[in-house]
Image (cartoon, rainbow, N blue to C red):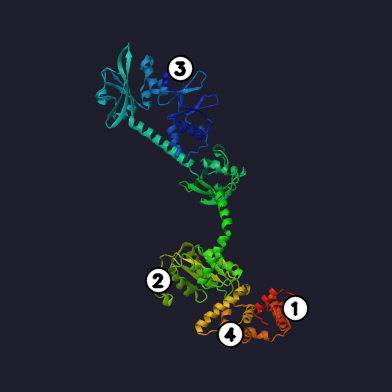
Amino acid sequence: MDAKYVDRVPIFYFNQSIRDLLHYLLQNDIDNDHIILCDARRKPCGIIHTGKLYKEIAFGLQFDHVLESICDSSYVTLSQNCRFINPELIAGKTIVVTDEDGRCVGIANQTALLLDHIKSDDTYRKKISKSFLADLNFGFMFSDIHGNILSMNTAANRLLCKTGLSSLGRIDDILPRFNYSNLKQTYQAVYRDISLEIQSYPYYEADEPVKIALFLFNLSDLHASKKSLAEVKAKYKELLEIANHSYDEIYVTDNTCMCVFVNKACERIYGLRREEMLGKTSAQMKAGGFISSDLSEKVIQTKRRLQEVQTTKIGQKILVIASPILDKNGDVRRVVINSREISDMIDVRVSADNLSRQNYSNIADKLMDLTLTSNKIVAESGIMRKVIKQVTRISQTDAHVLISGETGVGKDVIATLIHEISSRRGHNLVRLDCGALSGELIESELFGSETPAAAGRNAGRPGLLALADKSTLFLDKIDEFPYDLQGKLLHAIDDKCYTPMGSSRSVNSDFRLVAATSKNLPELVREGRFREDLYYRLNVMSVVIPPLRERQEDIPFLIQSFLSGINKAAGTQKRISPGTIEQLKRHQWGGNLRELKNILEQLCVLSDGDQIEEKDLFLLPEFAANEAEPADDYTSLIGQRELPAILDLLEEKLLRSSVKQCDSTYSLGKLLGISQATAVRKLQKYGLRF
């Protein structure tokens, strides 16, 4: 076979990967239609059609697969030393040319090869059969030297819209300007709106041209195929460049958790070359310590988008977001993983925190003081300031809040504070006391009613959920919310919509829920009196308010705040002595703030003069019992008061007695064996003077 008939094409080995082939084609801008696959001895074992390859890539072909998995065996082999060619065997097939040892040389130009043999071999001129002509995938026909068409194959018949050999016509019908003086030529023409390329060759007998062989190619199909292939290649190359220029990691696995694609960023994050990651499963990456968790497996199991922070083998902290790609049956086909290094971000944040911690703390304290002042909240004790700081942070979110604490600790005040310093403060706080209404009235009040006869006066009125749209809904005594309505409330919390009584339509409400209780809700859940799922929805953020007995530092300030309000309301100028304040600090306050306010109101009415003294306390039942106690019998207080309170009583009695024996804090300190500064503090604590 003459070398002019052989086209050199790329040769790859059957066990190489698709990734290797793509890299070669794109790097070298190869445009061949075919690639030859060989075994280890360079003998042909298949061919790959590049057009088909790019199309399969577009539909998710895995790059780690070996080339043998996509090769085609519809080819024939011919030796380059071959002198005899059977046209019927090679028609319509790819011809792989080999050397004398059977090793690949290239692919034969079928058109030129067939024509040469038809022209030069008289045997084949007689053997060209209809079956051979029918098998060719391009148009072929013979005409006499005058242009009368003698025969054509099926492909030519289809191109020229002919119906049979009886009406073949002339070359001039296809090429009106056909040059009979130059029989070896290539034309491009449009025949019945079909763009054709026609190659003509003379057919000789006794050195005289007696016939003309014509090959017909549909340019439209050829151009469309090349354009489609070029577009697919360009799109793939563009997407590959985009992925490789992404700073974030792009890591793709199939539905078996095997890596099928990585971009260049993965090399930086995992400390591996791309070739080392492709084909590995997530389990293998985890076993090698390159990732700390197999997120692909979790996504395949849940079919949901997941994210987590992981640590790589080289110590990089990365934020990993894994998303599933589902097929038409809803099964996971691919898992796309995007990761970003956050180690530097964490380091910068820690440094910034260390540098500005003191300044931030000072600013936060000032802001909290401003918040407390503007909302008339007393929080001088450390435990209460922690609560207010927590509330301040919670208020900046839209999370639901559960406030718990004993009766009278001020849960409603904290609920108001959460609303007033939140982004919803532009709308009125909506309140409902769940313990003040029956179940039917609560449903009507909360959800509203569209039934004229329902819920009496609330019929046809919007509920509190409607009024709480874009605002905050405060449900006090949530532990008394009817059990049979808890499911309906849960639905409103989850879906931000509800159905009014007597209606079939849903109403949307963007509300934030703040609930309060003085009961142990987990205990109520265990007793079956409160829904567990509702408890967890309410308890997204939890605020526990300490009882008054645990925040004694706040009592003097609370007394002054309450007394100011009482004076303003009654038009009085009542004051309270330091000794009385100290006595009030030692009280157990089972009723908390509510009890303190109630006692102050009574003292203002019962006390003589403008100042409330210690003796006035014994006008109240809560303190009268203490007056009858033996002066020196403190054992009777065991069980009624805590040890610190009993010790305070003893210390005060000793100081009162010592003050009578001394004339200065110096002598008092010397008598009791304490420093003068300590003596001063003790006297101030109990309101004593010389």
- The amino acid pointed to by label 1 is Leu
The answer for how far apart the CA atoms under marks 1 and 4 are is 32 Å
Disc 1, SS: helix
- The amino acid pointed to by label 2 is Glu
Residue drawn at point x = 50 percent, y = 48 percent: 324
- Sequence-first tag of 3 and 1: 3
Which is nearer the eye, 621 or 169?
Answer: 621
Residue drawn at point x = 32 percent, y = 16 percent: 203
Q: Which residue in the structure is indicated by mark 1? A: 671
- Sequence-first tag of 3 and 4: 3
- Sequence-first tag of 4 and 2: 2
Residue 158 visible to an observer of this rendering: yes
The answer for how far apart the CA atoms under marks 3 and 1 are is 129 Å
Give the mark toward the camera: 4 or 2. 4
User: Which mark is on residue 82?
Assistant: 3
- Sequence-first tag of 3 and 2: 3
The answer for how far apart the CA atoms under marks 3 and 2 are is 95 Å
Q: Which residue in the structure is indicated by mark 4? A: 611
Q: Which residue in the structure is indicated by mark 2? A: 450
- Sequence-first tag of 2 and 1: 2
Residue 436 in the image, given as x and y percentages of width and height: 51, 77
Residue 162 in the image, given as x and y percentages of width and height: 28, 28
Q: Pointers 3 and 1 in contact (CB under 8 A)?
A: no
Give the mark toward the camera: 1 or 4. 1
- In the figure, is residue 579 to the left or right of 248? right
Disc 3, SS: loop
User: Which mark is on residue 300?
Assistant: none
